[in-house]
Image (cartoon, grey):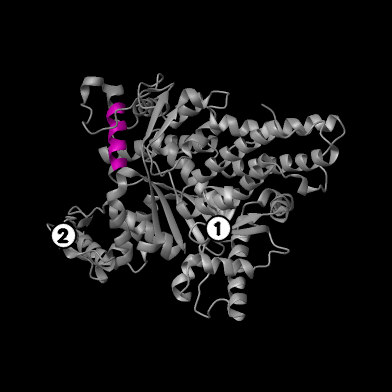
Amino acid sequence: MTNMIQNAKDQAAALAMAAYKAAAADGTLPEAEVKTAPVEIPKDTANGDYTTTFALAAAKALGKPPRVIAQALLDHMNLAGTYFTSAEIAGPGFLNFRLGDQWYAGVMNAVETEKDVYGTNDSLKGQKIMVEFVSANPTGPMHMGNARGGVLGDTLASVLTACGADVSREFYVNDAGHQIDKFARSIEVRYLQLINGEDSIAFPEDGYQGEDIKELAEAYYDEHGDSLLNVSEQERQDALAQFGLSVNLPRMKTDLERYKIHYDTWFYESTLHESGYVAETVDLLTEKGWTYEKDGALWLKTAEILRDHFRKQGKKEADIEKLDLKDDVLRRANGFYTYFAADIAYHRNKFAVRGFDKVINIWGADHHGHVARLKGALDALGLNGSERLDIVLMQLVKLLRDGEVVRMSKRTGKAISLHDLLDEVSVDAARWYFNAKPDTQMEFDLGLAVREDSENPIYYVEYAHARICSLLRALETDGVTVPETADLGLLSGEAEKALIKQIAQYCEEIKLAARDYDPSHINRCLQELAACFHRFYTACRIRGEEPRVAAARLKLADDTRMVLKNGLKLIGVDAPEKM
């Protein structure tokens, strides 16, 4: 797809190189090995829209002052038929280029030709990528961290798809191991208390205390009575765990569907154990010499693996020693495999069995210590986890209401869940706000999220789209529709040019969002696009304007509408036509 910003950069670089070759050919500049210098958009575009450091970079090779080289380039540069109307020297030898009508028209033509795929590219074409996100324990309701991770993962998957990747969304269901044992025991005690009285059995100190556990015990009792009272403890716990999962998992799926998140795969941890894949993975690590036995348990030589990894990165031995690296248990003395062993097997499955080129996990920042260990284990298996597994660590969420911290749900008296949140604010508002830069702690203000004014960014952006739709409807009643063609050269005002530039920037922001694993690039781009449109709409009249000018401006307004719609769709937010 067309990226007019990249096209302009490529053309400016080619013009500088062609000018150098022409200057070298006639002897104005000496012949030398000269590389193409990068072209950038300067922060202040008053002196030009694009700039290159070609003359500065070539000064040493050519043995001449940068400004002398820059002047020679200008004298040998032909801008006829290009995106640029002029070029000039600035500062110590920068070459600045000014955009002309051809470039601005090219941006609008790209939007109108490509429509709902405008902004997409094929930079990741051929790559098979998994994004695993949320993967909340199915032992209770999803919390604010899950709400944030859900949007970040879902939107990142959309961004990677927009860059041509074959993307799969996955939820890893932790339906085995210690937390399920604790879940089962917690329900069991509440169940027995229902039958025999609350004082009949003490609730475990590390049990799940929530009201939802009591509700599960009550639901099982209402349906099955005291049928589990006289069976073995193991049979009772297995039955209650399965019942709890049968209730909680559909609830999680319902909440996520409501949140506009749809997974390609729900992968169950239990299948790894039942199939013997965890044992096979641990045996493979043993075969490769990466395990040892101690105190009846089987250990992974994590410290040795990580030391090798850090040495390859160039870390000094003294610095490595300061890290206090430790080994990890893979199989306990009782014969049960640890969560870490299952996690290694799960990620081995992603690469070795399902053939993903890249795996991206969205994790809470409290998991940062697990990142290097998991990558190292995959390296030890020969799967190149250091390069193929990427972890996005997201910071905590602070929930506010009109500036005041909110800690509890009025309904349950516990931390507010995703379900509670979506009862208070719209799904669109939740998705917008949680699609914030992952590595920064975010504040979600419930009061701001429901405000209908320009202070609320999601309202501001959606209103821009609705405003354009309203304009198009109003003009249609006058018999005026968006023209097939228009004289785009008439769009010469600053507000018009700024709006077109921001439309072009949308393509760049998708690339940056994919590169940085930070889909909040799209939010910021859409906010600025909405702001540019509102300024344009204030400065540039459409209704009642001279017909040729009105036609060009109407076309620009409609192009803006299409890009706003594309961007909102990318982050899973509606583009309303009325507000």
Please state which of residues 533 and 133 is positioned toward the viewer in this rendering: 533
**Residue 535 image-quadrant placement:** top right
Mark number displayed over residue 321: 2
Residue shown at 80%/40% (left/top)? 549
Quarter of the image with the C terminus is top right
Q: Residue 340: horizontal and vertical position, in percent?
A: 28, 53
Question: What amino acid type should be assigned to the residue bearing mark 1?
Answer: Thr
- Is 146 magenta? The answer is no
Residue 1 visible in image = no
Residue 451, position as x, y percentages in the image? 54, 23
At horizontal 72% and vertical 64% (from top left) the residue drawn is: 80
Q: Earlier in the sequence, mark 1 or mark 2?
A: 1
- Residue 307 visible in image: yes
The crowd level at tag 2 (other Cα within 10 Å; few <14, some 14-19, many 20+) is few
Furthest residue in direction left, as rendered: 295
**Residue assigned mark 1:** 51
Which corner quadrant holds the N terminus? bottom right
**Left/right of residue 564 with respect to residue 154 in the rendered view:** right
* Relative to 564, residue 341 above or below: below
Residue occupying the far right of the picture? 479
> How packed is label 1: few (under 14 Cα within 10 Å), some, or many (20 or more)?
many
Three-letter code for the amino acid on which mark 2 is drawn: Glu
Tell whether 88 sits left or right of 496.
Answer: left
Q: Which mark is residue 271?
A: none
Q: Which residues are magenta?
A: 179-191
Residue 70 picture quarter: bottom right
